[in-house]
Amino acid sequence: MASRLFSPISIKKITFKNRIVISPMCQYSSVDGFADNWHLVHLGSRASGGAGLIIQEATAVSPEARISPSDLGIWKDEHIEKLKEINEFIVSQNSIPGIQLAHAGRKASVSAPWLGNKKLDFAQGGWQTVAPSAVPYHDNEPFLPEALDNDGIQKVISDFKAATKRVVAAGYQVLEIHAAHGYLLHQFLSPLTNIRTDEYSGSFENRIRFTLEIVEAVQSEWPSDLPLFVRISATDWADGGWNPEESVELSKILKEKGVDLIDVSSGGLVSHQKINIGPGYQIPFAAQVKKEATILTGAVGLITEAKQAEAILENGQADLILFARESLRNPNLPLDFAKELNDEIQWPKQYERAKI
């Protein structure tokens, strides 16, 4: 009997050959937002390694939307050519290319992790960050984020819309909107970072307004027959913050608006978060959203073993399993997992002699 992990699933017109997804992971390896051969090999090797869906790292919709100066971007047409090449290779491996569109908000303008992950001031090549409110992530930052006014909000919405048009031109077949991990959309969702006094703050309905406007802008350019995902942080892991109950309510609304799947992560909003980390620690949130919002969910977070992933699917806690660090350790993770679960799957013909 075939495993659930290696059973196909169809969302809109796309059929994924299995439930294994490569989670979007920043590589901090771009110049001026351009993809290069590192991204081709990184993403391509995971496609040849057997994953059903490859979601490209958080990709900035504008220069100021980047986390670091080395982030991928899709804010100009010149970015499309290399991304299209990468996607064509992914498709050639019978995998589906996806992208995560993002705006880092107040968490932007920092150095790459191996350069200290430090906030960059203007002399170091940093830039003015934006947020719903002028509240910094760390108290000792060299400058405050600038609270977005109405024109600034409309610019971000327009940036997501224009980026989506390029996403289509580059040949992506899944688009995920990043509303998690303390980045701009998440900053609007949480009362810990959104202390505005206008129609984008205060009540739950007001705090989700910006995210819904982004979804609508993306949908105006994204084909209606292709899957649309939204990644959320189910909880801020901090008192008074965004919580699982609000995540369920938002997911219900997103489903009504035509979103196909909620990619359920957590945390990342505030530096004083207290996370109870352990194997599969975010699975209960994915299960709650799936059950109570009756929408497809993706599970992510310290999922490292084939039987662990299979159990999540068998228990009805999620529909897709996203692998991040474990896939960094092993690009051929699906090939190994299939062997462990006694599933017969197609290998790249160039690798077939290694099956025995």
Image (cartoon, rainbow, N blue to C red):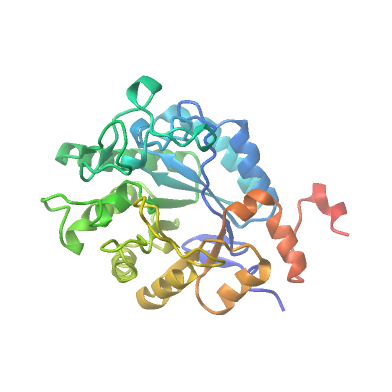
Residue 152 percent location from the top left of the image: 21, 37
Q: What residue is at 11 percent from the left and 51 percent from the top?
A: 197
Q: What residue is at 70 percent from the left and 75 percent from the top?
A: 2
Q: Residue furthest top?
A: 123
Vertical arrangement, residue 255 with respect to residue 128, above or below: below
In the rendered structure, the answer to whether residue 114 lies left or right of residue 231 reads right
Q: What residue is at 40 percent from the left and 36 percent from the top?
A: 66
Is residue 344 in view? Answer: no
Vertical arrangement, residue 34 with respect to residue 217, above or below: above
**Quarter that holds the N terminus:** bottom right
Residue 22 percent location from the top left of the image: 57, 53
In the rendered structure, the answer to whether residue 254 lies left or right of residue 329 reads left
Q: What residue is at 66 percent from the left and 72 percent from the top?
A: 307
Residue 280 percent location from the top left of the image: 54, 67
In the depicted view, which residue is nearer to us: 136 or 51?
136
In the depicted view, which residue is nearer to us: 1 or 193?
193
**Quarter that holds the C terminus:** bottom right
Residue 20 percent location from the top left of the image: 60, 61
Quarter-of-image position of residue 227? bottom left
In the depicted view, which residue is nearer to us: 243 or 163?
243
Is residue 313 in view? Answer: yes
Vertical arrangement, residue 311 with respect to residue 345, above or below: below
Tally the numbered discs. Answer: 0
